[in-house]
Amino acid sequence: MSTQSKVLVLLGAPGAGKGTQAPILAERLGLLHLATGDMFRAAVRDATPLGVLAKGYMDRGELVPDELTIRMLLDRLRRPDAEGGVILDGFPRTVGQARALDAALAAEGVRVERAPYIEVPQGELVRRLSGRWICRANSHPFHDQLNPPRVAGVCDEDGSDLYQRQDDRADVVQARLDAQLPPFREVVDHYRAAGVLIAVDGTKSIDLVTKELLAALLASGDGDPSAHGTPDRA
Ligand code: AMP
């Protein structure tokens, strides 16, 4: 990170659509997309020491402990490809993580510029998570009703096969929401208090949500680190 680096935090409960929107926003805004869920899944797949530690928590739908998660993310942020700015997806998920991020960024003269928040009611999250399919190569998400792939079982973007995540099974989905929503709400409050939260209605179509996110980010001075627009301070 450098003082020029832009940091956006994309907020949303599990199933809100972060994994769909983050790559689109990253491309449109010229930012690196970093998803801690993808980083953990890669570590599990490669059976690294971190992956071995994280797997049990992930399979149960629990959060991986802050200490491991914070270290993994901050190490990743120190790599040169993060210099141009990042959009974080799935991090922070606890206030402890949010504070650790704030402190690490402050040490580099940077702060979270915006926290766009994709808002979706809880009942809708269950429906979305249990119909979700993810591609093997790049975690591109699809949904059997809301966003089906053009060819069943095949990713539209890269042609790799689609699978259902172990933690998207119906019995784990509810446990995940029960474990993850309370700390997530505190994270939303953290960014609201910091005056950087921008909430958008995540129940609309994928395209409309993208448009609203981009409009909110660009209107609020995205591209100009000195401008801080009119984020949601309610
Ligand atoms: P995701 O793909 O973002 O839903 O993440 C999948 C799983 O990885 C989560 O259910 C957690 O077990 C773990 N995980 C991802 N990001 C975090 C985080 N910031 N803090 C703790 N656990 C995380």
Image: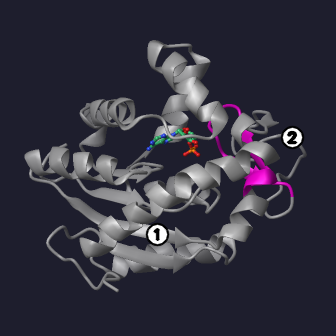
Query: Which quadrant of the rendered structure holds the N terminus?
Result: top left
Height in image: 43 above or below 71?
A: above
Residue shown at the point (39%, 53%) measured from the top left: 87
Height in image: 229 above or below 87?
A: below
- Judge left or right: residue 120 versus residue 169: left
Q: Position of residue 114 (x, y in %)?
A: 31, 67
The magenta stretch spans which residues? 129-144
Q: Amino acid at mark 2?
A: Gly
- Is the residue indicated by label 2 positioned so its CB lies within 8 Å of ligand 1? no
Q: Position of residue 86 (x, y in %)?
A: 34, 50
Q: Nearer the viewer, mark 1 or mark 2?
A: 1
Question: Splitting the image into 4 quarters, where does residue 190 fall?
Answer: bottom left
Q: Amino acid at mark 1?
A: Tyr
Residue shown at the point (44%, 55%) measured from the top left: 26
Cα distance between the residues tagged 1 and 2? 30 Å
Question: Splitting the image into 4 quarters, where does residue 140 fall?
Answer: top right
Q: Is residue 152 visible?
A: yes
> Is 116 covered by the magenta stretch?
no
Q: Secondary structure at mark 2?
A: loop
Q: Earlier in the sequence, mark 1 or mark 2?
A: 1
Q: Position of residue 10 (x, y in %)?
A: 44, 60
Q: Secondary structure at mark 1?
A: strand
Question: Splitting the image into 4 quarters, where does residue 136 fall?
Answer: top right
Residue shown at the point (49%, 20%) measured from the top left: 53
Query: Which quadrant of the rendered structure holds the C terminus?
Result: bottom left
- Judge left or right: residue 100 versus residue 52: left
Q: Which mark is residue 117?
A: 1
Q: Which residue is mark 2?
A: 153
Q: Is residue 108 visible?
A: no
